[in-house]
């Protein structure tokens, strides 16, 4: 199970840049929060990063967000992207598991889920969405929500379609 900063480090550069671009364009507060966290970690003012060309700024942000001390900022960044861009995927997963939610956001998760339901839910996601996006979501879900479902952890570790770097 990967932490948020590890997800940023292991995902493809194309997906990482897609996330940055999406957040930059659609969620300015989340982007500014991530930029501020990166600036603080680099011991510079945020305006210094803002004045850099966007490609250079993005590269800096991704490098710094992949460090363990920025895991909370990386987690907030990934959550914002998932909830705003991939709500349909979140809802598909939770509906398949028959977990009540509000547009993909859950108040109380069960302590465990049935193996067959989980495998079916994963297959639904892999059939509808890019494998790398599914891998990021499921890793983030298991890490951030405190779900800690042993069967999801096992699937993430054993199913090559869910391993970053192998995603199709």
Image (cartoon, rainbow, N blue to C red):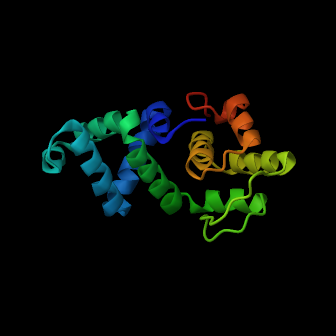
At a point 36% along the width and 50% down the height, the residue shown is 21
Which image quadrant: the N terminus?
top right
Q: Position of residue 30 (x, y in %)?
A: 35, 58
**On screen, residue 33 above or below 123:** below
Does residue 3 appear left or right of residue 162 in this picture? Answer: left
At a point 51% along the width and 38% down the height, the residue shown is 3
Q: Using the image as rendered, state which of residue 114 and residue 111 is in the foreground.
A: 111
At a point 25% along the width and 50% down the height, the residue shown is 36
Does residue 138 appear left or right of residue 44 in this picture? Answer: right
Q: Position of residue 155 (x, y in %)?
A: 73, 36
Which image quadrant: the C terminus?
top right
Residue at the right extreme, as displayed = 116
Question: Toward which corner of the image does residue 105 lie, by quadrant?
Answer: bottom right
**On screen, residue 158 above or below 80:** above
| Label tally | 0
Note whether residue 127 is visible. Answer: yes
Q: Using the image as rendered, state which of residue 42 and residue 20 is in the foreground.
A: 42
Q: Position of residue 79 (x, y in %)?
A: 49, 54
Q: Position of residue 41 (x, y in %)?
A: 25, 39
Residue at the bottom extreme, as displayed = 102
Does residue 153 appear left or right of residue 32 in this picture? Answer: right
Note whether residue 66 is visible. Answer: no
**On screen, residue 59 above or below 89:** above
At a point 78% along the width and 48% down the height, the residue shown is 118
Q: Using the image as rendered, state which of residue 138 and residue 114 is in the foreground.
A: 114
């Amino acid at each position: 199970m990967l932490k948020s900063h590890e997800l940023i480090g292991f995902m493809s550069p194309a997906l990482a840049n897609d996330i940055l671009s999406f957040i930059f364009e659609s969620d300015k507060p989340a982007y500014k929060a991530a930029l501020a966290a990166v600036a603080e970690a680099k011991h510079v003012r945020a305006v210094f990063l803002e004045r850099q060309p966007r490609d250079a700024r993005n590269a800096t942000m991704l490098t710094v967000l992949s460090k363990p001390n920025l895991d909370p900022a990386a987690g907030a960044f990934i959550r914002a992207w998932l909830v705003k861009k991939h709500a349909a995927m979140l809802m598909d997963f939770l509906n398949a598991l028959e977990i009540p939610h509000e547009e993909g956001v859950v108040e109380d998760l069960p302590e465990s889920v049935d193996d067959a339901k989980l495998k079916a839910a994963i297959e639904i996601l892999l059939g509808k969405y890019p494998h790398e996006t599914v891998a990021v979501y499921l890793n983030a879900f298991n890490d951030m929500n405190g779900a800690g479902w042993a069967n999801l952890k096992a699937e993430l570790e054993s199913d090559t379609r869910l391993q970053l770097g192998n995603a199709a």
